[in-house]
Amino acid sequence: MRFPVAGRTVFALSNGSPHPARAGIRSTLVGVLANALLAAGKALAGILGNSAALVADAIESTSDIAMSLIVLGGLRVAQRPPDEDHPYGHGKAEPLAALAVSLALLVAAGGIVVTSIRGILIPHPVPEKYTLAVLLAVIVIKETLFRFVWRSGHESGSGAVKADAWHHRSDAVTSAAAGIGIVLAIWWNYPPADEIAALFGAAIIAFNGVRLARPAVMEITDAAPPLELEGRVRSVASGVAGVVAVEKCRLRKMGFDFYVDIHIVVDGSMPVREGHGIAHRVKDALRDSGLRVADALVHVEPDDPERLARARAGPGGA
C-alpha cells in the first residue's frame, strides 16, 4: 500500500510499517558519518606515523563514503512508487547500487595491491608504534558498523545495504592486516611488512566483492527467488476460497518487493464474474500476506484433469 508523507508518496508494507528502505537509509547515513571521521583520523595518523598502509586505509575510507552515497541514492530511488515510465516501480535501482558497491570493492582491492607493491619497492621508514592504537580503534569501530549495517540489510532484504556493510568489514580487514604488518615491521625492523600484510587483506576484499556481486546480477537479470518463497506464495493463494489448485507460479524481485505471475485453477463451470472475483481475492491475499508482494497478475484456469495433475505435481511439475 501507499500513504502520503509531506506532499509525496512512499511505500509501506501491508501492515502499515514504513518501507524497509528507510532502515537501510538510516544505517547508511551512520556509516557515512563514521567513515568521514575515520578517514580524517587515519590520514593524519598515517602521515605523521610513517605508515603507508594507514594512509591507504584512509583513502579506502574516503572511497567508502562515495560508495555509501551511491547506496543511499539507490535506496531513495528504489522506494519511489511506480510511474508512467516505470510501471513496475524503481526497485532495480537497489541491486544496481549493490553491483556498483561490489565492483568498488574489487577496485579498492586492486588499489591496495598497487599501493602495497609500491611500498615494498620504495624504501620508507618503519611506522610509529602509536599507529597500532589508531588501527585497533578502527578495527573495533568498523566491525561494529559492519554488524549494525549488515543487520539492517538482512532485515530489509537489501543487497545494496549488505554490500555497504562489507565495505565496513573490508576496512576492518585491511586495518587488521596493516596492524599485523606494522607489528612485524617494528619487530623485524622491516618497513615493507605492513604492505605485505595488506596484500592478504586485499585478497579477502576481492573475494567478498565477487561474492556480493552475484546476487545483484541475479536480481537484475530476474533470476527466480528461492523455492521456499514460491511455496509460501502458492500456499497463500491455495488458501483462498474457490481456488482448486495453483498451476504455475513465477516471481521476480524488484528491489525490496516481489511481483508474482500466478495461474490458479477454479471450477470450470462457474461464471466468469465469479472467477474474476476469486482472482482479485488471491491478489489481495498475496499483497496482504507480509511476503512483500507489490502486485500479482492472476490468471484463471478451468479445472480439467490434466491441468489439475500438473498443479498437484508442484513447482517441478508445473
Image (cartoon, helix red, strand yellow):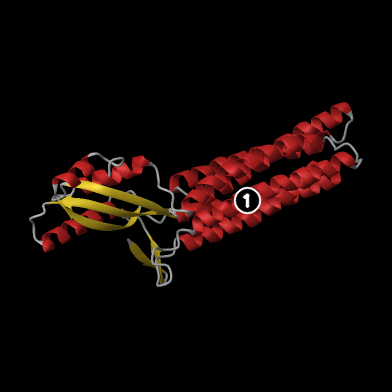
As drawn, which residue projects farthest toward the top?
187
Residue 90, x across and y down, in percent? 45, 63
Q: Quadrant of residue 271?
A: bottom left
Q: Quadrant of the N terminus?
A: bottom left
Residue 117, x across and y down, in percent? 82, 41
Residue 185 appears left or right of 11: right
Q: Residue at x 14, y 52 (%)?
A: 266
Q: Could you say whether the residue bearing mark 1 is in a helix, strand or loop?
A: helix
Q: Residue at x 22, y 54 (%)?
A: 282
- Between 21 and 85, the one lying in front of the other is 85
Report if residue 141 is visible in the image: no
Residue 138 appears left or right of 219: right
Q: Quadrant of the C terminus?
A: top left
- Between 263 and 155, the one lying in front of the other is 263
Q: Residue at x 33, y 48 (%)?
A: 291
Residue 171 appears left or right of 25: right
Q: Amino acid at mark 1?
A: Leu
Q: Is residue 239 above or below residue 91?
A: above
Residue 75, x across and y down, in percent? 50, 58
Report if residue 204 is visible in the image: yes
* Residue with the mark numbered 1: 103
Residue 82, x across and y down, in percent? 39, 66
Q: Residue at x 28, y 41 (%)?
A: 317
Mark 1 is surrounded, within 10 Å at the Cα level, by few (under 14), some (14 to 19) or many (20 or more) other residues, namely: some
Count of numbered circles on the image: 1
